[in-house]
Image (cartoon, helix red, strand yellow):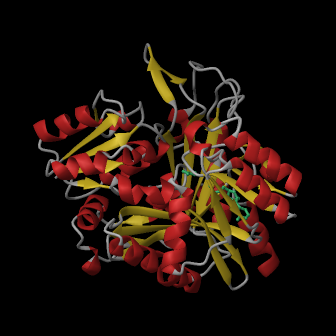
Amino acid sequence: MKVLVVGKGGREHALCWRLSQSQTVRGLYCASGNPGIDRLAKPVALSPGDIAGLLGFARDNSIDLTVIGPEDPLAAGIVDEFVRAGLPIFGPTAAAAQLETSKSFAKTVMREAGVPTADFAVFDDFDAARRYIAAHPGPMVVKADGLALGKGVTVCPDSATALDALADAMERRRFGGAGARVVLEQVLRGEELSFFALCDGENALALGMCQDHKAAFDGDRGPNTGGMGAYSPVPQFDAALEARVLDEVIKPTLRAMKARGTEFRGVLFVGLMVDGERINVLEFNVRFGDPECQPLMMRFQGDLAEALLVATEGRLARTPITLSPASAATVVLASGGYPGEYRKGIPITGLERIEGAEPSELKVKWALDKVRVKVFHAGTALRDGQLVTDGGRVLAVTAMAPTLEQTLQAAYEGADLIEFEGKHMRRDIGRRALDYLARKR
Ligand code: AMP
Ligand code: GLY
């Protein structure tokens, strides 16, 4: 089949990498691609937001499956448009994407479906929300309802902080229209976990668990980013928990969405808080995470294009998915200053020391046949043949090895071989899992 991937970051590079290995893929295209992706997929000079352009391209080129990476085109209804035109596309409709684009919608569906989640109240009126905070002293979470680039959530230790966060969202409109409505929520404690499921409207298959690292600096300090690293699987959690998430969260959510007439097809990305035996949903996203997708794609075995097509066609029931039992992790190399201001166009060197050279310069020789390192491009560009930085998150150095310790060693060895001025990475990706494993021993 001919497959078109929409997006241009590390997530889409990982998707293209796995899709390029699919037996069933005869042609691979990416709109708009990046220098890493362009080696695997034919670049299509259309932005991910150009729905009419993408639809025309898919029709003119007889694309058999279009795969959407980021949330914005989903929220804008790209799936609805393609379905109307009779073109196969992987992802949820705009109505189903509300699980991510509206936190109050997601909470309402959770309540309807009996999915465990924190107690909450929804407000469109600033004064009513203020009164609610005054009547419920103590810690509280304030969430802007709409998409706010991951910045719309404030976990507040007390009412004063909550009032300030509320005014930020509703009065000062820090997140624009996304803050016209807010969700006020009880604070949950525990260990965070991300869970990914491939859904066909009715059936779901686990794509793996991840833990990400949102803060810019080690020890979860500093401002929130899109994600500085991730690893999968998460040894703190076992197969029994995976089964519980499928039964207690994913399946009831799919049933509730179907009953509403807004079937969910695509990747459901569940943010969970786990506290002993208690699991609670923090949020839904309706797509692969970035950078979570990178380790997930390293572990995914089999024909990805076929799996996504089967989900799109509602035929997931008889399709098994196999994940490698190995450990995978990604370390993001970011531009100096990210997530604040940063420069672009800085030359990047050293990639060939990992991927080009035969043998590679990686020192993890002790198990080289079992260790694999892939560098996914997130924000890069080519300028006169030279690879340069072109975004906040620049590269996602991803490794897979039999154990988490080996995986992290390989990923950091790779990350250290790459150079660009201002390069910043977290040095503690996977730390919580390593600590857990050390305690267990
Ligand atoms: P969300 O976008 O809803 O996942 O929120 C972003 C982050 O805020 C989560 O990853 C959690 O770290 C935190 N968070 C959200 N909701 C809660 C909650 N009810 N209790 C504690 N932390 C939360
Ligand atoms: N890494 C978080 C996300 O993709 O939403």
Camera-side residue of 117 and 192: 117
Q: How many marks?
A: 0
At a point 68% along the width and 63% down the height, the residue shown is: 405
Residue situated furthest top in the rendering: 384
At a point 24% along the width and 67% down the height, the residue shown is: 310
Q: Quadrant of the C terminus?
A: bottom right
Q: Say above or below: 379 vs 92.
A: above
**Residue 235 picture quarter:** bottom right
Work out whether residue 441 can be spotted: no
Camera-side residue of 187 and 32: 187
Work out whether residue 143 can be spotted: yes
Judged left or right of residue 222, residue 207 is: left
Residue 171, horizontal then vertical, whole percent? 70, 38
Residue 404, horizontal then vertical, whole percent? 64, 65
Q: Say above or below: 379 vs 397.
A: above
Q: Say above or below: 211 vs 150.
A: below
At a point 22% along the width and 59% down the height, the residue shown is: 23
Camera-side residue of 415 and 152: 152
Residue 343, horizontal then vertical, whole percent? 64, 20
